[in-house]
């Protein structure tokens, strides 16, 4: 059993819940660090998950700057 993460789930629990393993699961979970506006664009299929994951490594200010170029 792994170390608990947010809400008492382990990373293994999360992998099973989202149907992804290892790095793929980490990339998907990283999307939670995005500003809500970009999360919504991903949900709508207007922004890819790979681009979203890369943007999630930026500061919130830098992310908002990028979002403004998308018409936000």
Image (tube, rainbow, N blue to C red):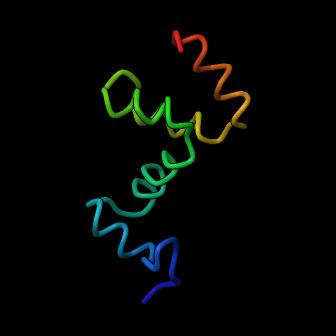
In this view, the residue farthest toward the bottom is: 1
Q: Position of residue 6 (x, y in %)?
A: 51, 71
Give the total number of marks visible in the rendering.
0
> Considering only vertical position in the picture, is 16 above or below 24?
below
**Residue appearing at x 35%, y 66% in the figure:** 15
Q: In this view of the protein, which residue sits in the foreground, 26 or 67? A: 67
Quadrant for residue 35, please give it.
top right
Q: In this view of the protein, which residue sits in the foreground, 60 or 28? A: 60
**Residue appearing at x 33%, y 34% in the figure:** 43
**Residue appearing at x 44%, y 72% in the figure:** 11
> Considering only vertical position in the picture, is 14 above or below 57?
below
Q: Position of residue 51 (x, y in %)?
A: 49, 30
Q: In this view of the protein, which residue sits in the foreground, 39 or 52? A: 39
Quadrant in the picture for the N terminus: bottom left
> Considering only vertical position in the picture, is 57 above or below 70?
below
Give the left or right position of residue 44, taking residue 4 as reference.
left
**Residue appearing at x 40%, y 53% in the figure:** 24
> Considering only vertical position in the picture, is 8 above or below 18?
below
Q: Position of residue 13 (x, y in %)?
A: 35, 75
Give the left or right position of residue 26, taking residue 56 as reference.
left
Give the left or right position of residue 47, taking residue 19 as reference.
right
């Amino acid at each position: 059993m792994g170390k608990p993460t947010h809400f008492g789930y382990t990373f293994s629990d999360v992998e099973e819940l989202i149907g992804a393993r290892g790095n793929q699961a980490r990339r998907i979970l990283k999307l939670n660090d995005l500003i809500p506006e970009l999360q919504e664009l991903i949900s709508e299929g207007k922004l890819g998950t790979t681009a979203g994951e890369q943007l999630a490594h930026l500061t919130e200010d830098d992310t908002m700057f990028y979002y403004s170029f998308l018409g936000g």
